Structures are given as structure tokens and as C-alpha cells.
Image (cartoon, rainbow, N blue to C red):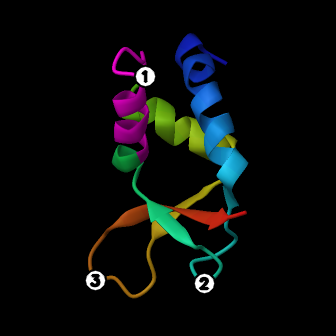
Amino acid sequence: MDNNQSNISPYIDVLMESFKPAASNEAATHFFSTDEIYDAITQLNPGADISTQDVYQAMIDAGFIFKPRAGTSGIDFRWLLLQK
């Protein structure tokens, strides 16, 4: 794990207190973009030394699925989350 991945781990841990990975679009209760997650983290901590690539990799590592929302036209990739 590189340093930036360890910098983002506490934020992903907190996210996972409320959400778990959804298995499908139908099962998901929330849909967030990588940018939305990144913006939320940097709003909480403007000095966070992370990038959107770090967010993407941390979400993949945590088991979240990244795909287009069902029923959308165009390419609008979102993370599928299920509220606990």
C-alpha cells in the first residue's frame, strides 16, 4: 500500500460504517461518482494528500463496484453503495 492509500484509508473506513458494496444497480441505495467522494473527503480535510485515482483504487480495494447507472443514456459511471 502506498502512502496515499494509507492516507485515504480512514475516510473509506468511515464510509463503510454507513455503506457496504452493493451487488447490483437494483440493490444499490446510493450512487456516487469518484469526484463526489473525493470532494467530500477534501471538504472534510482540505489538506488531505489524495487524488481521485487514490479514491478510485481505495474503493476498488474495499470491494465497491463502479459501473454506469441502469437506465442512463451516455456514460455516467457511479459507485454502487448499499446503506446498512
Kindly indicate whether the residue at mark 1 contacts the one at mark 3 (C-beta within 8 angstroms).
no
Q: Nearer the viewer, residue 30 or 70?
A: 30
How busy is the neighbourhood of tag 2: few (under 14 within 10 Å), some, or many (20 plus)? few
Q: Taking 49 as reference, is 64 above or below it?
A: below
> Residue 26, which numbered label?
2
Residue receiving disc 1: 50
Q: Is residue 73 left or right of residue 80?
A: left
Kindly indicate whether the residue at mark 3 contacts the one at mark 2 (C-beta within 8 angstroms).
no
Q: Position of residue 3 (x, y in %)?
A: 57, 11
Q: Is residue 4 visible?
A: yes
Residue sitting at the far left: 74
Q: Amino acid at mark 2?
A: Glu
Residue receiving disc 3: 73
> Residue 41, which numbered label?
none
Sequence-first disc among 2 and 3:
2
Q: Taking 13 as reference, is 34 above or below it?
A: below
